[in-house]
Image: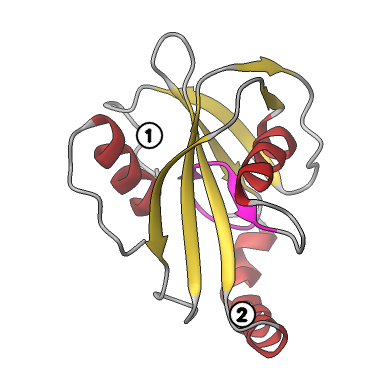
Amino acid sequence: MDWRQRIEPFTRPLFFLVSRLTRGMTLGVRVVATDPRGRVMLVKHTYLAGWWLPGGGVDRGETTPDAAVRELREETGLVATTPPRLVSIHSNERFFRGDHVLVFAVNAFTVSQRTSHGEIAEVGWFDPADLPDDAHRSTRARLAEIFGGAPVDPAW
């Protein structure tokens, strides 16, 4: 386990405290990027365990579609060539009251270089029906909703 993963449980409360003091609500995006073979792009962070959908926070003055495009490019090197499509909206109250996550789909892109160095340990394409064992539960849930016909859960 990487040192960032070991300290994350201790730094998370501090991050949430600062976030709570500086903003009443947080907004994040996740992106389901699909290649022509139907595989989805997942990322492994240096500070969290497991495979996740690429994404992150929406910056002040940024639209959620713009944040989705930016995060996808930064974390994976995929540059969307069509606007992302909003798939679902979720409340993520598990760790932080007032947190919301919007899921976007992108299926047209070019491949470039990642610009987020030090944050992403690994990227990979996976069949949604055959995810790695350590895919995060939220990743599994979102992909089951999109590809498996599961009802959309409003909770992250």
Q: Is residue 50 magenta?
A: yes
Residue 7 against residue 78 in the figure, above or below: below
Q: What element does badge 2 sit on? A: helix
Q: Earlier in the sequence, mark 2 or mark 1?
A: 2
- The local crowd at label 1, few if under 14, some if 14 to 19, many if 20 or more residues have their Cα within 10 Å, is some
Q: Residue at x 62, y 35 (%)?
A: 122
Res 132 label: 1
| Quadrant in the picture for residue 154 | bottom left
Callout 2–callout 1 Cβ contact below 8 Å = no
| Quadrant in the picture for residue 148 | top left
Q: Is residue 14 magenta?
A: no
Residue type at tag 2: Phe
Residue type at tag 1: Pro
Residue 47 against residue 149 in the figure, above or below: below
In percent of width and height, residue 73 lies at 71, 33
Q: Which residues are magenta?
A: 47-58
Res 10 label: 2
In percent of width and height, residue 30 lies at 52, 46
| Quadrant in the picture for residue 70 | top right
How much space separates mark 2 and mark 1, taking CA atoms?
27 Å
Q: Residue at x 55, y 51 (%)?
A: 29
Residue 134 against residue 48 in the figure, above or below: above
Q: How is the image coloured?
A: secondary structure
**Is residue 74 rendered to the left or right of residue 56?**
right
Q: What element does badge 1 sit on? A: loop
Q: Residue at x 38, y 34 (%)?
A: 132
In percent of width and height, residue 50 lies at 47, 48
